[in-house]
Image (tube, grey):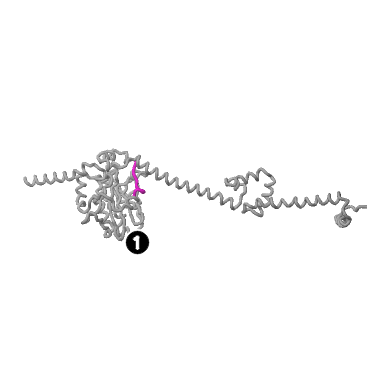
Amino acid sequence: MKAITLIIGLVFYSLTSFSFAADGKMPGDNLDLNAVLELFKDSKSVEDFENKLNSEKSNINNLDLNEDGFVDYIRVVDYVKDNAHLITLQVAFSSDEIQDVAVIELDRKDDKTVVQIVGDEALYGRDFIVEPVTDNAKMAYNANSWSSVQYIYGPTYVVYVSPWYYGFYPHWHHRWRPYSWDVYYGYVYPYHAHYRHCGYYRSYHAHHHYYGHKSYSHTYYNSHMHKTAQQSLPVNKKAMNEAQIKNLQAQKIDGTLKQNSNQREIRKVDTAPMRTIEGRNAPTNRTVTHGNTPSTRSTVDSPNRNQTTTRSTHSTTRSPQSTRTPQTRTSPAPVQRTPQRTSTPSSTRQPSSSQPSRSTSSPQRNSSGTKKPR
């Protein structure tokens, strides 16, 4: 009888200890981050970590976000920024929609690797951070001794991106039904002794870089599971709604598009004067360059100037001052003709001039072929 009452008391105690997570009814309760971080610690590589995470024998993945009655396949992607690695866990809802589940943030500073796992706010609430236990809570854990960390920061590491996506999974993978929450929690509860919750991020550099790669699913955000889970959270722990995420993404996209458009406009402006300086096509240069419109109008209005400019283009095409040189060359032409016209009538109309002047002028006329006076 005492044994029966003892067993009933233990069962009641265990159920009351589980109530804090069961009452939350968060989707992330079916993927315990303490167990995930322990699995990552013992993995030989990122690919090995993905294979163990999606194995039924590990009893760690119990997540069913699409509510199809089977445990979801979790793909792993590594986003790298300097010495930071973001091992991101994702679930594919369709060929176009991916929902982030959690991210393992690694950052190496001064031969010390800091590690934390952060649950996605849509599944766990905001700032759900888990890290290894240390003697001093203020000191960060050094994960250099982990086999997975040594592999990632090794010289032969290639950034890992899961080759599997929606509808295409490894041949060894088979789907299984999720366990009830009480049974699942019994599998993952022993891992809680080695990890703890943390109220801040050890590496803001890695965490800020993650937001540039964050993915969310429109189907999941409109599901009944997500809406009921968010209602149970306090205001400071609720996730952003879909409209807020779209606005943030739209601002980023518009900013990049504006920068690209400005760069294209600058390139167009820069290419126009380069063509005019080369002087390959005169008509096109007059239409493209708006700064030289007064010169083009003057050449079009006066045909004589067009003739002079066309004749001078063969000699001077690159210098814009060459268009003024024909005016200086044409000006002495009438000056040379005017003295000839004034000299001829002066010799004919002034007969009262001295005889030496006539004698000097008469041989010039004979040489020129004019009639002799008789």
Closer to us: 115 or 344: 344
Visible in this render: residue 363?
no
In the rendered image, the residue lying farthest to the right is: 374
Instruction: Tell me residue 159's x, y (percent).
Output: 36, 55
Visible in this render: residue 103?
yes
Instruction: Tell me residue 133's x, y (percent).
Output: 22, 54
Q: Is residue 65 left or right of residue 321?
A: left
Closer to us: 296 or 65: 296
Is residue 211 found inside the magenta-colored segment of the image?
yes
> Which quarter of the figure has residue 218?
top left
SS label for mark 1:
loop
Image quarter where the N terminus lies is: top left
Q: In this view, does 170 lie to the left or right of 282?
A: left
Mainly helix, strand or loop, the magenta region?
loop
Closer to us: 201 or 347: 347
Graded by Cα atoms within 10 Å as few (under 14), some (14 to 19) or many (20 or more), the crowding at tag 1 reads few
In the rendered image, the residue lying farthest to the left is: 1
Q: In percent of the image, x 38 and y 44: which residue is there?
A: 249
At label 1, the amino acid type is Pro
Q: Give the range drawn in magenta.
A: 210-218
Q: Name the residue under label 1.
A: 155
